[in-house]
Amino acid sequence: MKTNINIIETIAALASEAESNWLVEQKTLTGKALALAFVKVPRFISKVNIESGEFSGWTLDQLVRVDILTQLDEANLTALFETAEMQEAVALTRSLPYLPNPSSFLLRATDAVRSNMGPVFDAIAFGNTYPKDYFNEAAWNQLVLKCIFNDKAIHQIIGLDERANQALADTLSDFAHERWSAGRRVPSQVWRLVPRFMNESLRSDIEKLALSKNPRDVVAASLVKQEVQNPGSTHGLWQELEEPEPIYIV
């Protein structure tokens, strides 16, 4: 469980006096009454954007909902998960690292990866430490691959480079072969996941990439080769390839 001290401090810095007073009142409640406060949050808390720090990209109402969730017992948390509309589900998913006994919510987290609701998937995939800390290799790879298949920005996944693995690298190679056979390509930055796991097939892929007419692919091939020869030397250099890139453009 992550500490919620940053949640409290961030809310205090952004909330109005009225908003702060409302939250203090709600946190004196327990059980179903407190769960109802979670549902009521948008009526009393603004959607002020959080622009820096641990919760950058969140809104104030989302963070207040997480604060309330950390006070709830497991039975009421379960009830909220089972009845949540989309924005509530986003808050629930973002709250996972901060809940007591986070590992007990693993099924909820993997359900979010399978979700067809984009904001819910994004809430588990991006800026969320839960997958890095609690997913096994298969679940982790499913999350990363779903991002790649849907042309989402994988560099926003916390722990992306740290949790790269041979199985994921091999699957990326297979995926690239399928796309190349169809006259298509994959986003260039996905190749950041392969330097530590090079084998004959991946070396062949990188040589092919180096001959691409797409300059981003050529940069990716160069970075992979550099990282293989000098591990750690490309830290920060992949940022050049982090701009959005349609996955199916030749």
Image (tube, grey):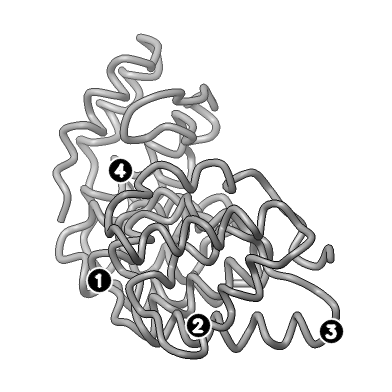
The residue that label 2 is drawn on is 202
Going by the numbered disc 1, the residue's amino acid type is Tyr
The residue under label 1 is 134
| Image height of 68 relative to 160, above or below | above
Residue corresponding to mark 3: 182
- Observer-side mark, 1 or 2, equals 2
Task: Please indicate whether residue 70 sits to the left or right of residue 118 in the image.
Answer: left
The image shows residue 56, relative to residue 222, as above or below, that is above
**Secondary structure beneath disc 2?**
helix
The image quadrant that residue 195 belongs to is bottom left
In the image, which disc is placed on residue 68? 4
Amino acid type at image mark 4: Ile
For discs 2 and 4, the disc positioned in front in the rendered view: 2
Q: Where is residue 211 in the image (x, y as percent from the top left)?
A: 70, 67
Name the residue type under label 3: Ala
Dot in front, 4 or 3? 3
Nearest the viewer among 69 and 101 is 101
The secondary structure type at the circle numbered 4 is helix
In the displayed structure image, the side of residue 230 where residue 59 appears, left or right = right
Q: Where is residue 144 in the image (x, y as percent from the top left)?
A: 49, 70
- Going from N to C along the chain, the mark reached first, 2 or 3, is 3
User: Badges 2 and 4: C-beta atoms under 8 Å apart?
Assistant: no
Residues at marks 2 and 4, CA–CA distance in whole angstroms: 47 Å
Residue at 60% across, 57% down: 86
Q: Residue at x 45, y 43 (%)?
A: 237
